[in-house]
Image (cartoon, rainbow, N blue to C red):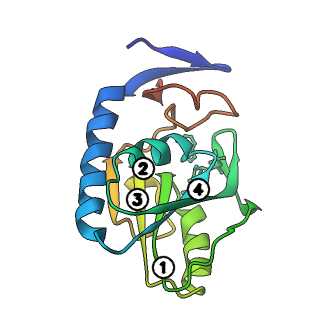
Amino acid sequence: MQEIKVHDKLFVPWLTEQTITDRVKDIAADINNAYAGKKPLFIGILNGAFMFASDLLKHITIEAEISFIKLASYKGMKSSGQVVTAIGLDVDITDRHVIIVEDIIDTGKTLHQFLPQLHNQRPASLKTAVLLHKPEATIHPVDIDYCCFSIPNKFVVGYGLDYNGLGRNLPAIYQLKD
Ligand SMILES: O=P(O)(O)OC[C@H]1O[C@H](OP(=O)(O)OP(=O)(O)O)[C@H](O)[C@@H]1O
Ligand code: HPA
């Protein structure tokens, strides 16, 4: 894999497509074991989680449902501090076993704000499956139940994650070059 340019910035390879696939399969197997017979409802957070949610669900072999909501807060490489719900939830989650599918926990602001709103709707259980976590950047605590990769506090693109709209279609993950 070679370094790439997205808008004005250079990015270096960080996680290959194969590395991601292997780990996503492991997480799916853990969820299959934990949720057999519970018909979980996966909720993917758009836009960033579209690729992770798609690949994860391909390896879910138990009965399950998926829906999506759209939350957004990032402008360029910075959190705007405001989490906006652009498309809301169209399913009743009361008494359901809910698994939130998110591409990245960075500052933690997005899920820290959103999870209590879901708790209020009284799901039977509420857990999180996250592709990437930046522990050094997380200042708003979030419980992560299934985490694919802990990564350093550097901006990343690819596999659903963007820099100002570009890079989401890359099948691997790249890190901002120093
Ligand atoms: O932990 P945080 O600091 O809140 O960052 C994580 C959030 O930021 C990104 O969303 P963004 O607002 O960029 O929207 P997008 O998913 O449409 O790219 C990402 O998809 C997470 O939802
Ligand atoms: O490192 C990141 N890359 C892309 N989008 C993001 N949203 C939060 N952190 C990131």
Check disc 1 and report the residue beneath it. 96
Check disc 2 and report the residue beneath it. 57
Cα separation between marks 2 and 4: 14 Å
Cα separation between marks 4 and 3: 11 Å
Q: Say if mark 3 contacts mark 1, CB within 8 Å.
A: no
Cα separation between marks 1 and 4: 18 Å
User: Identity of the amino acid at label 1?
Assistant: Arg
Check disc 3 and report the residue beneath it. 129
The reply to whether the residue tagged 4 has its Cβ within 8 angstroms of ligand 1 is yes
- Label 4 neighbourhood size at 10 Å, few (<14), some (14-19), many (20+)? many
Left or right: where 16 falls relative to 76: left
Left or right: where 88 falls relative to 161: right
Q: Position of residue 108 (x, y in %)?
A: 52, 62
Q: Earlier in the sequence, mark 1 or mark 2?
A: 2
For marks 3 and 1, give the one nearer the viewer.
1
Q: Earlier in the sequence, mark 2 or mark 4?
A: 4
122 up-or-down from 109: above or below = below
Q: Position of residue 53 (x, y in %)?
A: 48, 48
Check disc 4 and report the residue beneath it. 45
- Identity of the residue drawn at 59% across and 27% down: 167
User: Identity of the amino acid at label 3?
Assistant: Ala
User: Identity of the amino acid at label 4?
Assistant: Ile
- Identity of the residue drawn at 38% across and 65% down: 144
Q: Earlier in the sequence, mark 1 or mark 4?
A: 4
Determine if residue 16 is in view: no
